[in-house]
Amino acid sequence: MMRIGLDVGSTTLKCVVLNEQNEVLFKKYERHLSRIVEKSVEMLREVAEQFPKEKVLLSISGSAGMGLAERSDIQFVQEVYATRIAVNRLVPGTDAVIELGGEDAKILFLTDGNNASGLEVRMNGSCAGGTGAFIDQMATLLNITPDALNTLSKEHEKIYTIASRCGVFAKSDIQPLLNQGAQKKDVAASILYAVVNQTVAGLAQGREIAGKVVYLGGPMTFLSELRVAFDKTLGITGICPENSLYFVALGAAFAADGNETTLAEIINRIAHYTAKEEYRACPPLFKDKADYEAFTKRHLNAGVKVRDTLEDGEPVYIGIDAGSTTVKAVVTDKDGNIVCSRYMSNSGNPVPLMREFLLEVYTRFPQAKICACAATGYGEDIIKNAFSVDYGIVETMAHFYAARAFNPKVDFIIDIGGQDIKCFKVENGVIDDIFLNEACSSGCGSFLQTFAGALGYSIEDFAKLGLFADRPVDLGSRCTVFMNSSVKQAQKDGATVENISAGLSISVVKNALYKVIRAVDSKAIGREIVVQGGTFLNDAVLRAFEQEIGHDVIRPTIAGLMGAYGAALYAREKAQAAGKATELSTLLSKEALEEFTHSVKAITCRGCSNSCKLTVNTFSGGRKFISGNRCEKPVTGVKSTEAQYNMFEEKRKLLARYTYKDTGKPVIGIPMGLNMYELLPFWYKFFTTLGYDVKTSPASNRQLYLKGQHTIPSDTACFPAKLMHGHVETLLDEGVDAVFYPCMTYNFDENLGDNHYNCPVVAYYPEVISSNIQKLKDTAFIGDYVGLHRRHDFPGKMYEILRRHFPNGTFTKKDVKKASDAAYAEYDLYMRAVRAIGDKFLALAEEQHKPVIVLAGRPYHVDPEINHGIDSLICDCGAVVVTEDAVACKEKKFPTKVLNQWTYHSRLYAAAKYVVDRADKRVNLIQLVSFGCGVDAITTDEVRGILHDGGKIYTQLKIDEITNLGAVRIRLRSLFAALDLQ
Amino acid sequence: MAFTDRVEFTKEMKKEGYTILAPNMAPIHFRLFENLFASYGYNVEILQTRGRQIVDEGLKYVHNDTCYPALLTIGQMMDALHSGKYDLHKTALIITQTGGGCRASNYIHLLRKALEKDGLSYIPVISLNMSGLEKNSGFKLTLPMIRKALGVLAYGDLLMLLHNQTRPYEKEAGASRKLVDDWTKKLTDMFAKEKGYSAKEMETILPQIAEDFANVPVTGEKKVRVGVVGEIYVKYSPIGNNDLEEFLFSQNCETMVPGLLGFMLFKVDNRMEDIKLFGGSKAKFGVVKILFDYLVGIESHVIRAVEHANTVSNRFTVPSSYAHLKKLITGVIGYGCKMGEGWLLTAEMMELIESGYPNIICAQPFGCLPNHIVGKGMIRSLKNLYPKSNIVPIDYDPGATKVNQENRIKLMLAVAKENMEQAEKENAPKAEE
């Protein structure tokens, strides 16, 4: 008798055969490319051939095996459970298991830890996309194999911070790093560390991974450096046992019971398993071939004239679009005809590609006179510096220039590129509203590509498959990671590759329409629509788009080149306006290009405490381009040339006055985050008046966040909340007598709304802190419920609370009353100071004719670790930054379309109203939104509504742990460009 | 703006027999509510629709980052309006509004925004609330109506509990379902005749219901017992939780879902707790206390009814009182934590563990704010208190697939089964001694 375990994972199939002594007779591992039934049968036949006579017990496990097992009536063993069985038997005494699979990440705690007991299992949540598929995706991005990624990372010199939540986030961190010339080996290692961070942060949830730890699964088996990264991060030496790939299959084999049968019988049952087609389907893209031909013919009409010979001395203009995954370049003549163009895959470094292209232009058109050149896209800066390009243009504007050439009446442009979706409305010839995909819904083009690869197709072939699919799978409109599991489900339900291909194209479109633009119907987005970007070159995507919005659109034949084409047109306009029609571009000459060199060095800036990790690109002739900097200091040598009117900075200065003074009294520790930010003046005064010293936790930084990471129970909470763990841990390390972090259902009533709640997270996060930070057990934690909104009742209630915590405290009721009065006065003073600064800045802006940005968020968004320096970035654009609380007070309560019931959020509505009431077009609002903030799903719509009704542009910036500001810069530049054109 | 010029549901509309559409949540309770409203001349229809188009409508009309329940309830109503089944000029909508600090208080406004986007802002939306947030001349909750509604909570809770505890074991499939249907009809008739809803009548009728269930012939086998807690909509609604109840039944489990009465008690008690914690009017406290005590009375009848069932057939798990839950939670999380399901959710988990349901599904909409605190945030504490507890948080949202959710639940069930078998082993030798 043999026991067989079949592990059907998300991407691979594993089979183990055991004899009665539980010795491994056979094992096999291969990718199933979603052909689960065929591959399973194939593998089992192989077993049957080797052992034709044996009776067997077989069970199936694995995340994609459930449906197969159920329908073929074969025992199913849940995969984590199977792992546990195998580990307990093969590596006894194991404390914890870290298992990474194709799309799953799991941690099993098998034994009693220090502070918790019993078996605990953690699987990655529906939001975590890391793991094997993630590493594959990232390797593709680097244009290397996962093995090469592993080898490369051995030589790394530094680790970049890469957001570790899901592949899409990481991508938006990695791409700019590559574009800015970061070394591949460093990026490779950073990717592995990102996986480690994700696993630790997302799954450990308050339990330390320690003791005897076992590493399992494909990535852990194949990537030695990943194991090293885990070892280093966790401070352990993990074991990667023999057969580490097969533990799930082994567990399934061990667990197999029931009636013995023959393998032939099982193969028969599996082979006859035909999945029922019960998935949700969309209408087919094309009725028939004729329908498709009419469609292609129509789109061929939107072309640009191409000519390939030039007169002697004829002026030409060059546009370069260094995008996230591709580099595009276009050369036009003075009438906008295309002379030469190029579309290249960006394998991490756009510089050599561009050099080659420019040399080719010089060689092919020696007679041409290059009058001007413009660069756009993510790599705009580096290209501009490397080749001494005349102009830079923000990519949204470049696309607008190009679209206008095809339809002067264009009122809506949508560009789906490799990694991002950009769309904007055009009203009266001005860009009015810009939608960029926020970190969570990107993917798009490169996602299609990765998926095609996973199924064994090239992107072109894969997309074509879907054109005539009869029942495209309805995959909904969610981000990449979610789609993975939707596809998994569709496969389980028997969807064909054709229908999956069509479904993916449709979901890219739905994603753009309903996630990014959030259109209710086609009327909402416009009539004169120009679509562009490489992804629209895919007919299936284009057709899906037309179907979804219900009318035809224009897809220029150069849809993939529009950014570059727009840049060329822009260069032409600029040159002609400057009267430079006869002059030459500043572009490097042919000779200079031939001698061109480019070297990259990674250093850490010592200019200030930020310690930015800088990438220094040096080009021939000593020209330098530095990236990774948060300020201009490493570039210019001084912090800033012009005075910044930055209210975020002013608020930080105000709060910095409340510092710890050691007078030998008992020390109260206050974690500086969430509502404690704004309330610091209150509590500082309160406790110092009452006879305590007050110590705040230090300024947030990455280390502080990582310190508290392992105690975060819900990784989808907002970043500011998650930071609190680090703050409290740091306070505990510094030694305070008590940590003060009260629960506050209500905030102050500023009479701007119908109620004055705090949001649930702000209100009750102290409960999470006290439940999850075990170290707090040894220090007094004052997390009681406090109501500052009832000034009269507060002192009495507070006295009771403090009595409970300090039974021997010498304070009296009267003392608490006195401290309360002082605290309320101090808070008042602080708020007045804030408002006074606001007034001063507004007046200054008017005097100096500067634009004003009301940077509206929450008081705790002032923390630089949370806002990533967006405040000074706005100032760099020449604007005055004012906070929402400084202008909200100028408004009276007014009716809103939503229940206006949170104090901090009421300020947002009021601030929006203020901006609308200011007739000055140069006063605008940008809303900062923390990723995962549920309440902001409501406020953003309302703030947008208020601004739109008042004829102002709405800009929203989503912030998370992500540190890259590339996308933010585009938004800001687009906004200011739009304002300039107004 | 909409707040000021919202369309009222007028007396005339009621007279004209407007259809009032409501989203479904807890099926047993809501059926009773529907009938209750009908007896007062309100043509309320609890939507029984299912299917993906509900989610799609929701995605189309509601900010996609809004919680899943908002998406579904609004999606279900928009879907109904688009179905062509209703004369839109003779249709109104009704939705609850709690007035708490969670996003849920904004559902009604999101619904109005959805209507506005679709050019349907003439459709009146009625707010069903006990906080006096919005008023409509054509829709008034009278005292008898409120008392009957509270009755529905008690009857619904009992029916749900007995059904859950009987169905997995019934010898004749469908016997307990039939009892639910029979009693729903009987209760509806009684209510229409102004009977059956006073605390006194409940005291006699509730045990009768219990007795009926106790008399259902059962097999007596042992099954894995699973408790379900979570955000209120996702916890109860089959659309919200992908038919969780049916799935658990198919996996051979017995399910316990804490009732609505506890939630009601919690919401009422919050007002008193607020006053205790932060100060406030004694008079208000007094008024709230009257309602609270009335509810406690009803609750005790439900508990006693189950106790009575045990005298007939000793196999029912008796639910704990609200007071007991509150005692359990002391020191784990503060009474002031009231947004969403607040501390009650944590307390329910503790109560489930203590009453023999250590295997728990904590169902929550993806990114549910209160759940960061009282659900996922408290699992660590619970694990410390009850090492044998086996809790799995499951996220629900438009993108989460059933396959993933069921896979997670299966893991929890595998551990549950092992624990059950181990406990049996440990108990077996003792029984022989």
Image (tube, coloured by chain):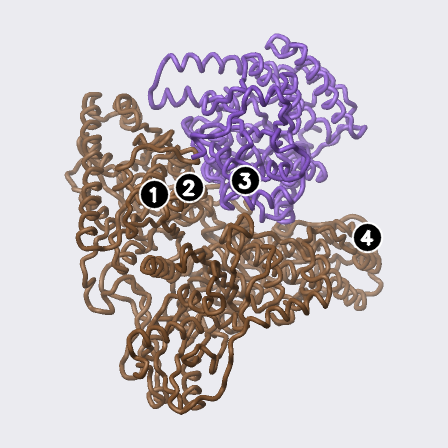
Chain colours: A brown, B purple
Q: Amino acid at mark 3?
A: Gly
Q: Is residue A442 left or right of residue A663?
A: right
Q: Residues within 10 Å of mark 1 (few under 14, many from 20)?
A: many
Disc 2 crowd, CA 10 A, few/some/many (<14, 14-19, 20+): many
The residue tagged 2 is A942
Chain ID of residue with mark 3: B
Amino acid carrying mark 2 in the image: Glu
Residue A951 appears anywhere in the view: yes
**Looking at the image, which is closer to me, B295 or B42?**
B42
- Image marks 2 and 1: residues in contact by CB distance under 8 Å: yes
Camera-near label (4 vs 1) is: 1
**Do labels 2 and 3 touch, CB within 8 Å?**
no
Q: Residues within 10 Å of mark 3 (few under 14, many from 20)?
A: few
Residue A833 appears left or right of A367: left
Q: CA distance from mark 2 to mark 3?
A: 18 Å
Which residue is tagged 1? Answer: A912
Residue under pointer 4? A260
Frontmost of labels 2 and 3 is 3
Real-space Cα distance between discs 2 and 1?
9 Å
Both marks 4 and 1 on one chain: yes
The chain to which mark 4 is attached is: A
Q: Nearer the viewer, residue B139 or A735?
A: B139
Residue B119: assigned label: 3
For image coordinates 75% across by 57% down, the residue present is: A3
Secondary structure under badge 4?
A: loop
Type of amino acid at the residue the image marks with label 1: Ala
